[in-house]
């Protein structure tokens, strides 16, 4: 059994182990809110992350680290804080994006152009394991926060830079917002109906970059456990989004025509997408193979001859003749309700899903049955929050209890953090 590290001094590297905590002042936090009721400590208990973050990509990354027990210290502008705090006021006066991506963090308000505040950050980095930043390219380097500037004094520090296009190249200084990256990565060419470009309805490029930053940081911590060395991680929103575009890119391989936007349907598989029942409600269904196609014809459409109809006898033929097949399906579904439609699909083992709005998701029976909701505290009171995928409640199934801490106010933790560092407010 691998021994757990004392945080009082930096241990010699042990193969395959994450070395938590680079300073003794973190010792008292090792088990605070990272374990509960004697259950297993969280995987990142004892790891400290300092983040110069704003908007979504970096905050979403560091929230995942906080969920796993890391101490995340969020550096914000004095008084105004992260500009995502002001996107809207939909959560009792708080911004929906901010509430989603900033639980379980401490807010340290610093003006990094002020010498005294900059010195606070540099002292904090002596105790940190990870530095994350998604400032404009070059901004962190001008503040002396690049990996090159920090590695000699802090050889074990992991520095993760998140930007739109990466830290070099001709697009380095080009402004990058989620919609712009979706466009550059080709997402808009495969989304919508073809009448006009349509973006994905959530910040998918930010999320992709945040999740690649998160997984790369976990990998870097594991590597540091083997050799004791930190590293630089350069995460590009464009590269993250293009990685997710692998199917349409290979579909268009060697100058072949790319996928045609198909709304909520699939460009290369049919039937796959929304179909309306007789009461006006819609169901999403998907058929992935010929066995399911036969079952669909027999059990749902009650037209077994369609299974061998030359127009529909393979997925390629069904896709080519989708308008004819859609008319046949609509003719059947228009005579039954949505409940009857779903019952037939379930009986025939055809994959299907309801077309839910946000209220339906809040009330989703499966999430309720699996007890996936908990409460977190905010400056305006408790609000519901979904437990992170993979985590458990109360140590069930040998897992861990995710850290589900509160949403901080701007600079809420200045006094406590400065006291830990032996500095005055």
Image: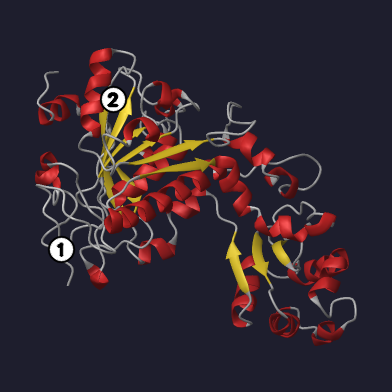
Q: Percent position (x, y) of residue 125?
A: 25, 33
Q: Quadrant of the N terminus?
A: bottom left
Image quarter for residue 410?
Answer: top left
* Observer-nearest of 297 and 67: 67
Left or right: residue 177 versus residue 380 is right
The crowding category of the residue bearing disc 1, from other C-alpha atoms within 10 Å (few below 14, some 14 to 19, many at least 20), is: some
Left or right: residue 54 versus residue 407 is right
Judging by the rendered image, the residue that carries numbered circle 2 is: 410
Which residue, as the protein is rendered here, is positioned at the far front? 152
Residues at discs 2 and 1 in contact (Cβ within 8 Å): no
Judging by the rendered image, the residue that carries numbered circle 1 is: 39
Label 1, secondary structure: give it. Answer: loop
Q: Percent position (x, y) of residue 266?
A: 72, 61
Q: Percent position (x, y) of residue 194?
A: 80, 46
* Observer-nearest of 256 and 317: 256
Image quarter for residue 50?
Answer: top left
The crowding category of the residue bearing disc 2, from other C-alpha atoms within 10 Å (few below 14, some 14 to 19, many at least 20), is: many
In whole angstroms, how far apart are the C-alphas of marks 2 and 1? 32 Å
Where 281 falls versus 293 (above or below)?
Answer: above
Q: Percent position (x, y) of residue 388?
A: 36, 55
Left or right: residue 305 versus residue 34 is right
Residue 281's mark?
none
Asked whether the viewer can see residue 218, the reply is yes
Residue under the point 89% across and 76% down: 311
């Amino acid at each position: 059994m691998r021994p757990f590290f004392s945080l009082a001094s930096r241990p010699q590297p042990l193969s395959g182990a994450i070395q938590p905590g680079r300073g003794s002042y973190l010792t008292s936090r090792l088990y605070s809110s990272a374990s509960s009721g004697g259950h297993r400590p969280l995987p990142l208990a004892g790891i400290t992350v300092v983040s110069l973050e704003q908007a979504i990509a970096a905050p979403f990354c560091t929230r995942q680290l906080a969920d796993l027990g890391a101490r995340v210290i969020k550096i914000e502008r004095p008084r105004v804080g992260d500009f995502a705090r002001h996107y809207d006021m939909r959560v009792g006066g708080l911004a929906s994006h901010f509430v989603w991506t900033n639980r379980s963090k401490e807010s340290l308000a610093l003006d990094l152009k002020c010498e005294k505040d900059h010195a606070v950050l540099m002292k904090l980095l002596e105790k940190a394991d990870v530095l994350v930043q998604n400032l404009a390219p070059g901004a962190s380097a001008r503040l002396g926060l690049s990996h090159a500037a920090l590695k000699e004094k802090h050889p074990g520090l992991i520095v993760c830079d998140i930007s739109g296009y990466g830290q070099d190249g001709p697009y380095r200084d080009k402004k990058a917002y989620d919609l712009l990256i979706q466009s550059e990565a080709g997402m808009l060419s495969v989304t919508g109906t073809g009448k006009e470009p349509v973006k994905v309805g959530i910040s998918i490029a930010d999320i992709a970059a945040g999740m690649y930053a998160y997984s790369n940081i976990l990998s870097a911590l594991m590597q540091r456990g083997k050799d004791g060395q930190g590293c630089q991680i350069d995460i590009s929103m464009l590269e993250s989004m293009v990685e997710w575009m692998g199917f349409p890119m290979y579909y268009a391989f060697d100058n072949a025509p790319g996928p045609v936007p198909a709304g909520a349907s699939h460009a290369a598989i049919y039937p796959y997408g929304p179909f309306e029942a007789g009461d006006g409600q819609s169901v999403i269904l998907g058929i992935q193979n010929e066995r399911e196609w036969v079952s669909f014809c027999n059990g749902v459409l009650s037209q077994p001859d369609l299974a061998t109809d030359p127009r529909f006898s393979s997925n390629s033929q069904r896709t080519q003749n989708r308008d004819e097949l859609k008319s046949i399906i609509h003719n059947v579904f228009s005579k039954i309700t949505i409940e009857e439609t779903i019952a037939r699909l379930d009986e025939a083992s055809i994959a299907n899903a309801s077309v839910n709005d946000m209220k339906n998701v809040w009330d989703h029976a499966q999430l309720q049955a699996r007890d996936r909701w908990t409460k977190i505290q905010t400056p305006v009171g408790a609000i519901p929050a979904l437990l992170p995928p993979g985590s458990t409640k109360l140590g069930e199934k040998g897992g861990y209890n995710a850290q589900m801490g509160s949403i901080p106010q701007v600079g809420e933790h200045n006094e406590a953090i400065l006291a830990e560092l032996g500095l005055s407010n």
